[in-house]
């Protein structure tokens, strides 16, 4: 199975958690590194390799002001009816490359009876992942530290399916995209178990550009249900595919980050790294025009 660069995500996450908790105090590198249980020199080098920016520069992506600005950008993109081929770019890779297919009502009702599901574990920039697929696409992708508990959850989702260990091209393709490598990637197919409302919400999430954010109300309005923000939040919480369906890009309208099925620190890490990558790409494009 495709493996991403081996950086100790958990140390990075501890540092991010400390930065977020002490943001107003502008924490010193020494204090952040101590929270991650490494030397300042090692943490600076490790974090910059992971994020593309220093811990000090990364901190601004965790601020309320940045979240509110990203909300404006993401909400506008999500609600813009002109999202078409003329608005292509790195921020729209999810929208352009990820395709969702719902399981049939029969598959849904039978708990996956007749489905063969292959699963594997892989390291990622955001921690250990369980990836599972049918022959029609990725059906489950979740951050998991406990392999046994992860498999138990997968079996509860598909109690009647045949579940076996095994990697395939679908897994490798999804993991490459998660690492940011879309070069030569086939469109990513997702084969999901969900209600029609959930499918509509998950498809809307694909239209939130990387490096921006949207509110629950923005998503509700985008699917034509402006008063259904709470139901939208419930559907987002049920998202079965981490990152590729970017539920981490949805936060509260106030700019506060809100919850995340795979942990608040991981949501902060995803948001910050995507924002940093967006700014770095914009800077490179600007320099190329000079």
Image (cartoon, rainbow, N blue to C red):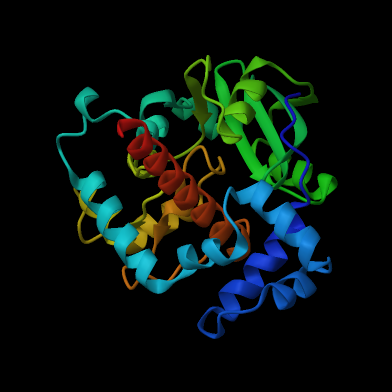
Residue visible at 51% across and 15% down in the picture: 186
Asked whether residue 126 is in view, the answer is: no
Residue 6, horizontal then vertical, whole percent: 78, 41
* Whether residue 8 is situated above or below residue 23 in the rendered picture: above
Quadrant of the rendered structure where residue 13 is?
Answer: bottom right
Report the front residue among 57 and 187: 57
In the rendered image, the quadrant that contains the N terminus is top right
Residue 228, horizontal then vertical, whole percent: 27, 59
Report the front residue among 132 and 153: 132
* Relative horizontal placement of residue 59, taking residue 141 as reference (left or right): left
In the rendered image, the quadrant that contains the C terminus is top left
Residue visible at 83% across and 67% down in the picture: 39
* Relative horizontal placement of residue 254, taking residue 189 as reference (left or right): left
* Relative horizontal placement of residue 27, taking residue 162 as reference (left or right): left
Asked whether residue 55 is in view, the answer is: yes
Quadrant of the rendered structure where residue 2 is?
Answer: top right
Residue visible at 54% across and 27% down in the picture: 107
Residue 259, horizontal then vertical, whole percent: 52, 65
Residue visible at 42% across and 45% down in the picture: 278
């Amino acid at each position: 199975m495709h493996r991403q660069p081996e950086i100790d995500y958990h140390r990075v996450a501890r540092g991010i958690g400390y930065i977020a908790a002490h943001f107003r105090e502008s924490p010193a590198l020494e204090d952040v590194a101590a929270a991650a249980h490494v030397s300042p020199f090692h943490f600076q080098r490790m974090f910059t390799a992971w994020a593309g920016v220093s811990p000090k520069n990364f901190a601004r992506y965790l601020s309320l002001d940045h979240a509110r600005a990203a909300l404006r950008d993401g909400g506008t993109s999500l609600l813009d009816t002109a999202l078409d081929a003329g608005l292509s770019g790195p921020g729209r890779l999810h929208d352009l490359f990820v395709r969702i297919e719902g399981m049939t009502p029969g598959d849904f009702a039978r708990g996956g009876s007749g489905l063969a599901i292959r699963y594997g574990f892989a390291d990622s920039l955001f921690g250990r992942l369980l990836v599972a697929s049918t022959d029609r696409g990725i059906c489950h992708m979740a951050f998991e530290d406990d392999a046994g508990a992860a498999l138990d959850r997968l079996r509860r989702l598909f109690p009647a399916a045949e579940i076996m260990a095994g990697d395939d091209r679908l897994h490798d393709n999804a993991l490459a995209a998660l690492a940011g490598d879309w070069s030569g990637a086939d469109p990513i197919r997702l084969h999901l178990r969900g209600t029609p409302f959930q499918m509509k919400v998950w498809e809307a999430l694909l239209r939130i550009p990387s490096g921006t954010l949207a509110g629950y109300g923005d998503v509700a309005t985008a699917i034509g249900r402006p008063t259904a923000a709470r139901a939208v939040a419930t559907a987002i919480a049920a998202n079965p595919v981490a990152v590729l369906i970017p539920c981490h890009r949805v936060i509260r309208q106030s700019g506060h980050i809100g919850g995340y099925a795979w942990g608040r620190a991981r949501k902060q890490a995803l948001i910050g790294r995507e924002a940093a990558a967006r700014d770095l790409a914009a800077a490179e494009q600007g320099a190329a025009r000079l």
